Amino acid sequence: MEIYKFGGASVKDAEAVKNLVEVLKTTGTSRKMLVISAMAKTTNALEYIIDLYFKKDKDLALAISDLKTFHLDICQELFSSTSHPVYQKIDSFFENLAVFLEHNKSPNYDYVYDQIVCLGELVSSTIVSEYLNEIGCTNTWHDCRNLIKTNEDFRDAEVNWEETQQNITSYINTDLLNISQGFIASDHDNFTTTLGREGSDYSAAIFAYCLNAESLTIWKDVPGVLNGDPRVFENTTLLDQISYEEAIELAFYGASVIHPKTLQPLQRKEIPLFVKAFSNPEGKGTCVMKGEKLIPKTPCFIVKNDLILLSLASLDFSFFVEKNIAEIFALFDKYQIKVDLIQNSAISFSVCVNNKFNTIDELISILKAKFKVTYNKNVSLYTIRHFDDAALKSIEKDKDILLKQYTRETVQLVVK
């Protein structure tokens, strides 16, 4: 069985959905599992709805109506009859959203986020499934929340692998075409959870692992994995092959083509991962597999924006020792701060962190009671794997460098 993951750009509108069909015509439809993301910008729209809900903003109803209209307009281009069952199903999803917003009593943002944001994947996968049925491509739609089970860590849930394996093995007929969602799952109380932003790749890898798939293909709007984001870096190069280990390194540093969690379950069973362009399904793309570290061998560029450089020093100029660092990391864990870079000296400690959960200001106020604290917000972290002098100079040019750190194969720069 093969697993195909279609991201938001590959199902962004009616033409994109039709193109998905062309991909399946090229590759075949039997023995496949399609993992579908929310349509382009839908997750952002749902996050806006969540913010309006918490602010009790009068524009909430309009935002929901606009999002529903966006999906209904796509359906009108795909289905000839307005009485098609897809419309009733979309109505049901939005009615469930309205009921939740009316009756929810929880002030927990992360819980509310997951119960609302799941609508994007549910609607998009339903539209794709119904359209495939409409053109004679029979498939089975699955609610991923009945398959992938997790703990209760909303917005960043951990998979219960044993229960998930049992569910997927029981419900998925590997001889057929199956369709489900990326990103979403549920806990033991059947509340919706999510696997982290951009976690749809991870969902696809979970299915690949549990179904012992022949391969996983991620269909994107790029020809494969490039040595840098072409929207940021010039003269990017297609990488033909990457080892699991190198891909994990690139993902760890923030390469956006492959989600950091995606590669580990694939590596355990040596399941190849292909990254291909949905506009060119016969193209070679990039293969992540056991073997050579990187083909061709070339510097790889990664940037993360909107980070915070946080520097701590002891108030009495005493040494910064393991006890201090352990205390700081305990606070990072408590406030859900993700660390991207660490550098320490005898009396100071610097980290570049992600403020995904908007807790940094509260954390800084606590740290100031014990340490001298300085920080820079809205910094960028550049990483170059397999760097050379030319690659480093191209990044350093015209930038205010706040911190630089080298290892044997990697250089990282925090810049303002």
Image: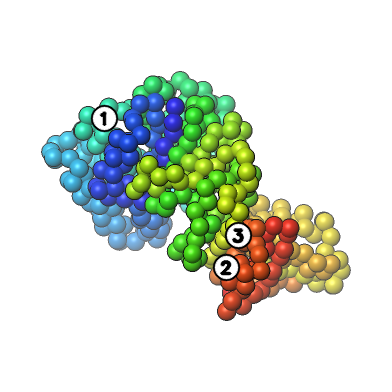
Q: Which residue is mark 2?
A: 380
Asked if labels 1 and 2 touch by Cβ distance under 8 angstroms, the answer is no
Crowding near the residue tagged with mark 2, few <14, some 14–19, many ≥20 C-alpha atoms within 10 Å: many
Q: What amino acid is labelled 3 in the image?
A: Pro
Q: What amino acid is labelled 2 in the image?
A: Ser
Q: Which residue is mark 3?
A: 299
Residue at (82, 56) in percent of width and height = 323
Look at the numbered disc 3 and give the secondary structure of its residue.
loop
Could one spot residue 28 in this view of the protein? yes
Q: Which residue is mark 1?
A: 137
Q: CA distance from mark 3 to mark 1?
A: 43 Å
Q: Position of residue 390 (x, y in %)?
A: 62, 69
Q: What amino acid is labelled 1 in the image?
A: Cys
Q: Quadrant of the N terminus?
A: top left
Look at the numbered disc 1 and give the secondary structure of its residue.
loop
The answer to which of marks 2 and 3 sits earlier in the sequence is 3
Q: CA distance from mark 2 to mark 3?
A: 19 Å
Residue at (59, 30) in percent of width and height = 269
